[in-house]
Image: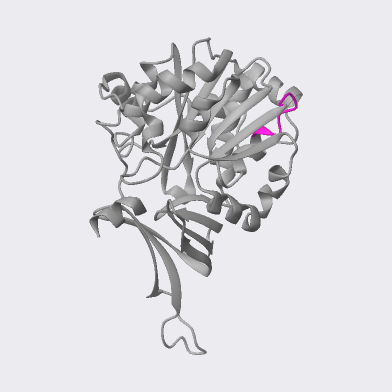
Amino acid sequence: MGSIGIQNGNGVSGKNGEGHRKSCWYEEEIEDDLRWSFALNSILHTGATKFQDIQLLDTKPFGKALILDGKLQSTEMDEFIYHESLVHPALLHHPCPKSAFIMGGGEGSTAREILRHKSIEKVIMCDIDKEVVEFCKSYLTANREAFYDPRLELVIRDARAELQSRVEKYDVIIGDLADPIEGGPCYQLYTKSFYEEIVKSRLGHGGIFVTQAGPAGIFSHTEVFSCIYNTIKQVFKYVVPYSAHVPSYADTWGWVMASDSPITLSVEEFDLRMKQRMNGENRYLDGRTFLSASTLSKAVRTTLENETHVYTSGAARFIYGHGSAYRLNVA
């Protein structure tokens, strides 16, 4: 879980170097014996919604950082790595994406990236937590334009219920969900039944599904990445796992893209589609970068090949930490 505290830093202050400088730090417990911390300029907001705890911090190394249930979601310094990786491979592999449905995505960055695609006519962003969405609209200025784009429809509802209630089909469905943590609001949206009965049925011909899939590092990929991959592999014919290092996460992060139509592009075609179909320049992703991202290490490939666990409500896996609902239940 994440915490904020005043600690003595290693820097010294004073004319002759006497004394120690005190700093305010954010600290996130990644495992029992592993913590990740960085210095803060200020605490912009801390509170709780009906569904989760929320903090907005101004950090020294990464700028503004959004924290939900004690887990870092994104920072303004490197969120482009996560969101470009989540959005553009799926939209570029689709022949002509006109519609997209975002599960989660309350901060608005995923919608921002989708709306850069010239062919997009309609984006549904469905997030369960209205307070988080309104908070991000107010504080995360980089995404303000996306929230007011006429192509964006914002729905405050559980994504499972919303997708289930809709009859239209989408070219791309994106899972920009919080990590599956015990007591968190999202873990049931990583299950085989959800992918099979709801997500797949709402994809149009040639449709592509992509989801964030948690830590994917050499040691961390066995938490949820491998079983999310294996679960999706039970549902879709073609499945592509890929990953990228996100500095503020202190780890490599994973995504899984899937379809019942082939999802292969050469580096040259990937780059050509970016040039022809997108507004603006990516800071991180291009064809060679995606080729590298989808070339996983031997250790991770071996785990994925041998993974047998299928994610269900009764057999869920969680990353380290607990959501606010869990903490309320055990308090």
Q: Position of residue 40 (x, y in %)?
A: 50, 67
Q: Does any portion of residue 174 appear in the rendered image?
A: yes
Q: Position of residue 303 (x, y in %)?
A: 29, 25
- Residue 328 shown left or right of residue 114 in the figure: left
Q: Is residue 232 on the magenta stretch?
A: no
The prevailing secondary structure element of the residues shown in magenta is loop
**Does residue 206 sit above or below 80 in this rendering?**
above
Coloration mode: one colour
Residue 48 in which image quadrant:
bottom left
Residue 172 in which image quadrant:
top right
Q: Is residue 115 on the magenta stretch?
A: yes
Q: What's the residue at 60%, 15% (across, down)?
A: 266
- Residue 41 shown left or right of residue 279 in the figure: left
The quarter in which the N terminus is drawn is: bottom left
| Nearest to the observer: residue 187 or residue 22 | 187
| Nearest to the observer: residue 156 or residue 88 | 156
Q: Position of residue 210 (x, y in %)?
A: 50, 26
Q: Position of residue 65 (x, y in %)?
A: 52, 56
Q: What's the residue at 28%, 36% (across, down)?
A: 317
Which segment did they paint magenta? Answer: 114-120
